[in-house]
Amino acid sequence: MKKPLSIYIHIPFCKHKCMYCDFLSFANETVTTQIQYINALMNEINLYKPYADRYIVKTIYIGGGTPSILDEALIGNVLDHIREVFKVDRFAEITIEANPGTIKYTDLLMFRDKGINRISIGLQSSDDDLLRLLGRIHTFDDFLGGFDAARRAGFENINVDIMSGLPGQDMHTLVDTLTRVTELNPEHISVYSLQVEEGTPISMRPDILRTIPDENLDRAMYAMTKKVLRTAGYRRYEISNYSRKGYESRHNTVYWTGGQYIGLGVGAASFFKGERFSNITNLANYIEICEDIREEIIKETDPVRLYDSATSILRENVQIMFIDSRIEEFMYLGLRMTDGISRAEFQERFKRDMFEIYAEPINKYIDSGYMEMNGDRIRLTDKGLDVSNYILADFILDK
Protein backbone atom coordinates (compact mmCIF):
# COMPACT_ATOMS: atom_id res chain seq x y z
CA MET A 1 0.00 0.00 0.00
CA LYS A 2 1.39 3.39 -1.01
CA LYS A 3 2.16 5.90 1.76
CA PRO A 4 0.69 9.42 1.61
CA LEU A 5 3.09 12.21 0.64
CA SER A 6 2.83 15.96 0.21
CA ILE A 7 4.98 18.14 -2.05
CA TYR A 8 5.89 21.80 -1.59
CA ILE A 9 7.22 23.68 -4.64
CA HIS A 10 9.12 26.87 -3.85
CA ILE A 11 8.94 29.62 -6.49
CA PRO A 12 11.25 32.30 -5.03
CA PHE A 13 10.53 35.15 -7.47
CA CYS A 14 8.54 38.33 -6.89
CA LYS A 15 8.20 41.77 -8.44
CA HIS A 16 9.10 43.61 -5.28
CA LYS A 17 10.19 42.65 -1.75
CA CYS A 18 7.68 43.83 0.84
CA MET A 19 8.85 45.85 3.84
CA TYR A 20 8.22 43.01 6.31
CA CYS A 21 9.27 40.03 4.18
CA ASP A 22 11.98 37.71 5.50
CA PHE A 23 11.11 34.81 3.19
CA LEU A 24 13.70 33.51 0.76
CA SER A 25 12.70 35.39 -2.39
CA PHE A 26 14.33 37.41 -5.14
CA ALA A 27 12.92 40.47 -6.87
CA ASN A 28 13.21 41.35 -10.56
CA GLU A 29 15.05 38.23 -11.73
CA THR A 30 15.24 37.79 -15.49
CA VAL A 31 13.04 35.40 -17.46
CA THR A 32 16.22 33.47 -18.31
CA THR A 33 16.90 32.88 -14.61
CA GLN A 34 13.31 31.84 -14.05
CA ILE A 35 13.50 29.27 -16.85
CA GLN A 36 16.84 27.96 -15.52
CA TYR A 37 15.26 27.61 -12.10
CA ILE A 38 12.27 25.64 -13.40
CA ASN A 39 14.65 23.30 -15.23
CA ALA A 40 16.58 22.89 -11.98
CA LEU A 41 13.34 22.01 -10.16
CA MET A 42 12.63 19.29 -12.72
CA ASN A 43 16.10 17.84 -12.21
CA GLU A 44 15.58 17.78 -8.45
CA ILE A 45 12.25 15.98 -8.94
CA ASN A 46 14.11 13.29 -10.90
CA LEU A 47 16.22 12.48 -7.83
CA TYR A 48 13.14 10.99 -6.15
CA LYS A 49 12.49 8.38 -8.85
CA PRO A 50 13.94 5.47 -6.79
CA TYR A 51 11.37 6.11 -4.05
CA ALA A 52 8.40 7.62 -5.89
CA ASP A 53 6.51 4.38 -6.47
CA ARG A 54 6.20 3.86 -2.71
CA TYR A 55 4.07 6.98 -2.29
CA ILE A 56 0.87 8.61 -3.46
CA VAL A 57 0.85 12.40 -3.51
CA LYS A 58 -2.18 13.74 -1.64
CA THR A 59 -1.38 17.47 -1.65
CA ILE A 60 0.81 19.86 -3.64
CA TYR A 61 1.46 23.45 -2.57
CA ILE A 62 3.10 25.99 -4.89
CA GLY A 63 4.39 28.82 -2.73
CA GLY A 64 6.83 31.66 -2.85
CA GLY A 65 7.77 34.37 -3.48
CA THR A 66 4.97 34.94 -5.91
CA PRO A 67 4.33 31.83 -8.06
CA SER A 68 1.78 33.71 -10.18
CA ILE A 69 4.59 35.97 -11.46
CA LEU A 70 5.84 33.12 -13.66
CA ASP A 71 4.63 32.33 -17.14
CA GLU A 72 1.77 29.92 -16.53
CA ALA A 73 3.33 27.32 -18.85
CA LEU A 74 6.31 26.97 -16.51
CA ILE A 75 4.03 26.09 -13.60
CA GLY A 76 2.28 23.59 -15.85
CA ASN A 77 5.59 22.00 -16.82
CA VAL A 78 6.52 21.40 -13.18
CA LEU A 79 3.15 19.81 -12.38
CA ASP A 80 3.33 17.63 -15.49
CA HIS A 81 6.78 16.41 -14.45
CA ILE A 82 5.66 15.64 -10.90
CA ARG A 83 2.92 13.46 -12.39
CA GLU A 84 5.50 11.71 -14.59
CA VAL A 85 7.62 10.79 -11.57
CA PHE A 86 5.01 10.39 -8.80
CA LYS A 87 1.55 8.94 -8.57
CA VAL A 88 -0.72 11.90 -7.79
CA ASP A 89 -4.09 11.16 -6.25
CA ARG A 90 -6.93 12.12 -8.59
CA PHE A 91 -8.53 14.05 -5.70
CA ALA A 92 -5.30 15.72 -4.55
CA GLU A 93 -5.52 19.23 -3.12
CA ILE A 94 -3.27 21.40 -5.31
CA THR A 95 -2.77 24.99 -4.14
CA ILE A 96 -1.04 27.97 -5.71
CA GLU A 97 -0.26 31.26 -3.96
CA ALA A 98 -1.05 34.44 -5.87
CA ASN A 99 -0.47 38.14 -5.37
CA PRO A 100 -3.51 40.22 -6.40
CA GLY A 101 -1.22 42.38 -8.52
CA THR A 102 -0.19 39.43 -10.71
CA ILE A 103 -3.43 37.50 -11.20
CA LYS A 104 -4.55 37.04 -14.82
CA TYR A 105 -7.77 35.31 -15.82
CA THR A 106 -6.07 33.39 -18.65
CA ASP A 107 -3.41 32.10 -16.23
CA LEU A 108 -6.12 30.97 -13.82
CA LEU A 109 -7.79 28.96 -16.58
CA MET A 110 -4.49 27.21 -17.30
CA PHE A 111 -3.96 26.53 -13.59
CA ARG A 112 -7.38 24.87 -13.43
CA ASP A 113 -6.57 22.88 -16.57
CA LYS A 114 -3.41 21.57 -14.84
CA GLY A 115 -5.39 20.38 -11.84
CA ILE A 116 -4.80 23.30 -9.47
CA ASN A 117 -8.00 23.45 -7.42
CA ARG A 118 -7.14 25.84 -4.59
CA ILE A 119 -5.74 29.37 -4.68
CA SER A 120 -4.36 31.41 -1.79
CA ILE A 121 -4.54 35.17 -2.38
CA GLY A 122 -2.36 37.48 -0.31
CA LEU A 123 -4.56 40.48 0.45
CA GLN A 124 -3.17 41.52 3.89
CA SER A 125 -5.44 44.59 4.22
CA SER A 126 -8.32 46.37 2.49
CA ASP A 127 -6.67 49.72 3.31
CA ASP A 128 -4.72 50.97 0.28
CA ASP A 129 -2.56 53.28 2.40
CA LEU A 130 -1.44 50.36 4.53
CA LEU A 131 -0.73 48.28 1.44
CA ARG A 132 1.49 51.03 0.02
CA LEU A 133 3.32 51.36 3.34
CA LEU A 134 4.02 47.62 3.37
CA GLY A 135 5.37 47.71 -0.18
CA ARG A 136 2.57 45.61 -1.64
CA ILE A 137 2.10 46.02 -5.39
CA HIS A 138 -1.71 45.77 -5.36
CA THR A 139 -4.74 47.76 -4.25
CA PHE A 140 -7.95 46.42 -2.72
CA ASP A 141 -9.65 46.86 -6.10
CA ASP A 142 -6.91 44.65 -7.61
CA PHE A 143 -7.74 42.02 -5.01
CA LEU A 144 -11.46 42.21 -5.81
CA GLY A 145 -10.71 41.77 -9.50
CA GLY A 146 -8.42 38.82 -8.81
CA PHE A 147 -10.93 37.17 -6.50
CA ASP A 148 -13.69 37.55 -9.09
CA ALA A 149 -11.40 36.18 -11.82
CA ALA A 150 -10.62 33.13 -9.67
CA ARG A 151 -14.32 32.43 -9.19
CA ARG A 152 -15.03 32.83 -12.90
CA ALA A 153 -12.14 30.48 -13.69
CA GLY A 154 -13.80 27.80 -11.57
CA PHE A 155 -11.97 27.98 -8.25
CA GLU A 156 -14.29 26.71 -5.54
CA ASN A 157 -11.65 26.71 -2.80
CA ILE A 158 -10.10 30.13 -2.17
CA ASN A 159 -8.00 31.25 0.80
CA VAL A 160 -7.41 34.90 1.65
CA ASP A 161 -4.40 35.97 3.74
CA ILE A 162 -4.90 38.89 6.13
CA MET A 163 -2.45 40.56 8.53
CA SER A 164 -3.11 42.29 11.84
CA GLY A 165 -0.86 44.45 14.01
CA LEU A 166 0.25 46.50 10.99
CA PRO A 167 1.86 49.96 11.31
CA GLY A 168 -0.86 52.55 11.76
CA GLN A 169 -3.61 49.94 11.80
CA ASP A 170 -6.45 50.41 14.26
CA MET A 171 -9.38 48.22 15.20
CA HIS A 172 -11.64 49.88 12.63
CA THR A 173 -9.34 49.15 9.68
CA LEU A 174 -8.89 45.53 10.76
CA VAL A 175 -12.62 44.94 11.17
CA ASP A 176 -13.23 46.64 7.82
CA THR A 177 -10.83 44.19 6.16
CA LEU A 178 -12.35 41.16 7.88
CA THR A 179 -15.88 42.27 7.02
CA ARG A 180 -15.14 43.00 3.38
CA VAL A 181 -13.43 39.65 2.96
CA THR A 182 -16.17 37.60 4.65
CA GLU A 183 -18.76 39.29 2.40
CA LEU A 184 -17.00 37.56 -0.52
CA ASN A 185 -17.47 34.14 1.14
CA PRO A 186 -14.03 32.62 0.57
CA GLU A 187 -13.74 29.06 1.82
CA HIS A 188 -10.69 29.75 3.99
CA ILE A 189 -9.13 32.75 5.76
CA SER A 190 -5.69 32.96 7.37
CA VAL A 191 -4.96 35.83 9.76
CA TYR A 192 -1.39 36.42 10.92
CA SER A 193 -0.04 39.09 13.25
CA LEU A 194 2.89 41.08 11.85
CA GLN A 195 6.26 39.82 13.06
CA VAL A 196 9.14 42.27 12.63
CA GLU A 197 12.16 40.17 11.69
CA GLU A 198 15.74 41.38 12.00
CA GLY A 199 17.24 42.54 8.71
CA THR A 200 13.96 43.33 6.97
CA PRO A 201 13.49 46.91 5.68
CA ILE A 202 10.77 47.61 8.23
CA SER A 203 13.10 46.68 11.10
CA MET A 204 15.35 49.57 10.13
CA ARG A 205 12.58 52.17 10.07
CA PRO A 206 12.05 53.48 13.62
CA ASP A 207 9.49 55.98 12.30
CA ILE A 208 7.33 53.06 11.11
CA LEU A 209 8.05 50.84 14.10
CA ARG A 210 6.66 53.52 16.42
CA THR A 211 3.25 53.20 14.73
CA ILE A 212 2.89 49.43 15.22
CA PRO A 213 0.02 48.63 17.63
CA ASP A 214 1.16 47.94 21.17
CA GLU A 215 0.72 44.55 22.82
CA ASN A 216 -2.67 45.39 24.31
CA LEU A 217 -4.13 46.53 20.99
CA ASP A 218 -2.57 43.55 19.21
CA ARG A 219 -4.27 41.17 21.66
CA ALA A 220 -7.56 43.01 21.23
CA MET A 221 -7.23 42.63 17.44
CA TYR A 222 -6.59 38.92 17.91
CA ALA A 223 -9.76 38.58 19.99
CA MET A 224 -11.80 40.66 17.54
CA THR A 225 -10.61 38.52 14.62
CA LYS A 226 -11.94 35.39 16.31
CA LYS A 227 -15.26 37.09 17.04
CA VAL A 228 -15.84 38.52 13.55
CA LEU A 229 -14.91 35.30 11.74
CA ARG A 230 -16.91 33.09 14.09
CA THR A 231 -19.96 35.31 13.59
CA ALA A 232 -19.47 35.02 9.81
CA GLY A 233 -19.53 31.23 10.02
CA TYR A 234 -15.83 30.39 9.92
CA ARG A 235 -14.47 27.71 12.23
CA ARG A 236 -11.07 28.27 13.75
CA TYR A 237 -9.25 24.97 13.31
CA GLU A 238 -5.68 26.16 13.95
CA ILE A 239 -4.24 29.12 15.81
CA SER A 240 -4.18 31.39 12.72
CA ASN A 241 -6.50 29.57 10.31
CA TYR A 242 -10.27 29.60 9.80
CA SER A 243 -12.43 27.79 7.28
CA ARG A 244 -15.88 26.77 6.17
CA LYS A 245 -16.64 23.16 7.07
CA GLY A 246 -14.63 20.75 4.94
CA TYR A 247 -12.26 23.39 3.57
CA GLU A 248 -9.42 23.14 6.07
CA SER A 249 -6.02 23.25 4.36
CA ARG A 250 -5.14 19.62 3.82
CA HIS A 251 -1.56 20.49 2.93
CA ASN A 252 -0.82 22.52 6.07
CA THR A 253 -2.54 19.88 8.18
CA VAL A 254 0.16 17.44 7.00
CA TYR A 255 2.76 19.72 8.63
CA TRP A 256 0.81 19.98 11.88
CA THR A 257 0.17 16.24 12.16
CA GLY A 258 3.66 14.93 11.36
CA GLY A 259 3.06 13.67 7.82
CA GLN A 260 5.81 13.23 5.25
CA TYR A 261 6.49 15.99 2.73
CA ILE A 262 9.12 16.88 0.17
CA GLY A 263 10.18 20.47 -0.40
CA LEU A 264 11.41 21.20 -3.92
CA GLY A 265 13.41 24.30 -4.79
CA VAL A 266 15.92 26.64 -3.23
CA GLY A 267 15.63 26.75 0.57
CA ALA A 268 12.64 24.37 0.63
CA ALA A 269 12.19 22.22 3.74
CA SER A 270 11.35 18.51 3.85
CA PHE A 271 10.51 15.71 6.24
CA PHE A 272 11.19 12.53 4.31
CA LYS A 273 12.36 9.04 5.22
CA GLY A 274 12.86 9.96 8.86
CA GLU A 275 15.02 13.01 8.11
CA ARG A 276 14.24 16.70 8.35
CA PHE A 277 16.31 18.91 6.05
CA SER A 278 16.25 21.98 3.83
CA ASN A 279 17.80 22.79 0.49
CA ILE A 280 20.64 25.28 0.10
CA THR A 281 19.57 28.93 -0.06
CA ASN A 282 21.93 30.27 -2.73
CA LEU A 283 19.93 30.54 -5.96
CA ALA A 284 22.87 30.35 -8.39
CA ASN A 285 24.38 27.37 -6.57
CA TYR A 286 21.04 25.57 -6.51
CA ILE A 287 20.65 25.98 -10.28
CA GLU A 288 24.24 24.87 -10.92
CA ILE A 289 24.01 21.79 -8.68
CA CYS A 290 20.74 20.69 -10.28
CA GLU A 291 22.27 21.08 -13.75
CA ASP A 292 25.11 18.80 -12.62
CA ILE A 293 22.48 16.37 -11.34
CA ARG A 294 20.94 16.25 -14.82
CA GLU A 295 24.32 15.30 -16.30
CA GLU A 296 24.85 12.63 -13.65
CA ILE A 297 21.39 11.14 -14.18
CA ILE A 298 22.24 10.55 -17.82
CA LYS A 299 25.33 8.50 -16.83
CA GLU A 300 24.26 6.93 -13.54
CA THR A 301 23.05 3.34 -13.40
CA ASP A 302 22.42 3.33 -9.64
CA PRO A 303 19.67 5.92 -8.92
CA VAL A 304 19.77 5.32 -5.14
CA ARG A 305 23.50 6.09 -5.05
CA LEU A 306 22.87 9.20 -7.13
CA TYR A 307 20.12 10.31 -4.73
CA ASP A 308 22.47 9.95 -1.76
CA SER A 309 25.41 11.73 -3.38
CA ALA A 310 23.42 14.54 -5.00
CA THR A 311 21.31 15.33 -1.98
CA SER A 312 24.39 15.47 0.24
CA ILE A 313 25.49 18.64 -1.58
CA LEU A 314 21.99 20.00 -2.20
CA ARG A 315 20.84 19.83 1.42
CA GLU A 316 21.75 21.53 4.66
CA ASN A 317 20.49 21.36 8.25
CA VAL A 318 19.96 17.61 7.97
CA GLN A 319 18.50 16.19 11.17
CA ILE A 320 17.66 12.55 11.79
CA MET A 321 14.34 12.59 13.61
CA PHE A 322 14.82 10.27 16.55
CA ILE A 323 11.85 9.24 18.66
CA ASP A 324 12.08 12.10 21.20
CA SER A 325 12.12 14.75 18.44
CA ARG A 326 9.16 13.14 16.71
CA ILE A 327 7.20 13.02 19.97
CA GLU A 328 7.92 16.70 20.67
CA GLU A 329 6.78 17.75 17.19
CA PHE A 330 3.65 15.62 17.41
CA MET A 331 2.71 17.46 20.60
CA TYR A 332 3.61 21.10 19.91
CA LEU A 333 2.43 21.09 16.30
CA GLY A 334 -0.68 19.03 16.93
CA LEU A 335 -1.74 21.21 19.85
CA ARG A 336 -1.83 24.21 17.52
CA MET A 337 -4.98 22.69 16.08
CA THR A 338 -8.27 23.28 17.87
CA ASP A 339 -9.15 19.57 17.69
CA GLY A 340 -5.91 18.80 19.53
CA ILE A 341 -4.30 15.38 19.47
CA SER A 342 -5.48 11.81 19.87
CA ARG A 343 -4.15 9.74 22.76
CA ALA A 344 -4.77 6.56 20.74
CA GLU A 345 -2.85 7.91 17.74
CA PHE A 346 0.05 8.84 20.02
CA GLN A 347 0.06 5.24 21.32
CA GLU A 348 -0.05 3.82 17.81
CA ARG A 349 2.79 6.00 16.53
CA PHE A 350 5.17 5.83 19.45
CA LYS A 351 4.15 2.63 21.31
CA ARG A 352 3.93 4.61 24.55
CA ASP A 353 1.10 6.21 26.44
CA MET A 354 1.02 9.99 26.22
CA PHE A 355 0.48 10.32 29.99
CA GLU A 356 3.56 8.21 30.67
CA ILE A 357 5.59 11.11 29.27
CA TYR A 358 3.43 14.21 29.67
CA ALA A 359 1.16 13.60 32.68
CA GLU A 360 2.62 16.52 34.65
CA PRO A 361 2.11 19.35 32.09
CA ILE A 362 -1.20 17.96 30.83
CA ASN A 363 -2.68 17.71 34.34
CA LYS A 364 -1.30 21.13 35.27
CA TYR A 365 -2.91 22.84 32.31
CA ILE A 366 -6.19 20.93 32.62
CA ASP A 367 -6.43 21.99 36.27
CA SER A 368 -5.77 25.64 35.33
CA GLY A 369 -8.29 25.64 32.47
CA TYR A 370 -5.77 25.93 29.64
CA MET A 371 -6.30 22.36 28.37
CA GLU A 372 -9.17 19.91 28.31
CA MET A 373 -9.72 16.26 27.56
CA ASN A 374 -12.66 15.42 25.31
CA GLY A 375 -13.01 11.68 24.89
CA ASP A 376 -9.76 10.44 23.35
CA ARG A 377 -8.51 13.91 22.45
CA ILE A 378 -6.44 16.40 24.42
CA ARG A 379 -6.58 20.00 23.28
CA LEU A 380 -5.92 23.57 24.31
CA THR A 381 -8.96 25.54 25.37
CA ASP A 382 -9.62 28.92 23.78
CA LYS A 383 -7.89 30.46 26.78
CA GLY A 384 -4.94 28.10 26.24
CA LEU A 385 -4.64 28.88 22.54
CA ASP A 386 -4.28 32.56 23.44
CA VAL A 387 -1.02 31.80 25.32
CA SER A 388 0.00 28.71 23.36
CA ASN A 389 3.66 29.71 22.93
CA TYR A 390 4.20 29.55 26.69
CA ILE A 391 2.30 26.31 27.13
CA LEU A 392 3.87 24.42 24.24
CA ALA A 393 7.36 25.09 25.60
CA ASP A 394 6.49 22.64 28.42
CA PHE A 395 6.21 19.83 25.87
CA ILE A 396 9.88 19.99 24.88
CA LEU A 397 11.53 16.92 26.36
CA ASP A 398 14.52 17.36 28.64
CA LYS A 399 17.50 16.06 26.72
Image (cartoon, rainbow, N blue to C red):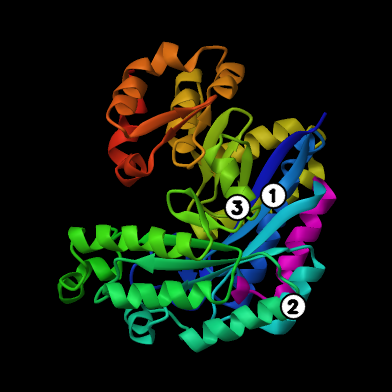
Amino acid identity at mark 2: Ala
Q: Secondary structure beneath disc 2?
A: loop
Pointer 3 with pointer 1, Cβ within 8 A: no
Q: Is residue 41 above or below residue 151?
A: above
Q: Secondary structure beneath disc 3?
A: loop
* Res 249 label: 3
Amino acid identity at mark 1: Thr
Picture quadrant where residue 240 is located: bottom left
Residue 274 horizontal/vertical position (percent): 59, 27
Picture quadrant where residue 30 is located: bottom right
Q: Is residue 181 above or below residue 144?
A: above
Q: Which residue is mark 1?
A: 59
Q: Residue at x 48, y 42 (%)?
A: 338
* Res 153 label: 2
Q: Is residue 202 left or right of residue 131?
A: left
Q: Is residue 373 above or below residue 11?
A: above
User: Is 242 in front, or is 14?
Assistant: 242
Amino acid identity at mark 3: Ser
Q: Which residues are magenta?
A: 68-87
Q: Residue at x 58, y 20 (%)?
A: 344
User: Is 264 in front, or is 165?
Assistant: 165
Q: Secondary structure beneath disc 1?
A: strand
Q: Is residue 369 above or below residue 169?
A: above
Q: Residue at x 36, y 26 (%)?
A: 395
Q: Is residue 395 left or right of residue 214?
A: right
Quadrant (top left/top right/bottom left/bottom right) for the N terminus: top right
User: Is 341 in front, or is 284?
Assistant: 341
Q: What secondary structure characterizes most of the magenta part? A: helix
Q: Earlier in the sequence, mark 3 or mark 1?
A: 1
**CA neighbours of label 3 inside 10 A, class few (<14), some (14 to 19), many (20+):** many
How far apart are labels 2 and 3 at the CA level?
20 Å
Extreme residue toward the front, this view: 231
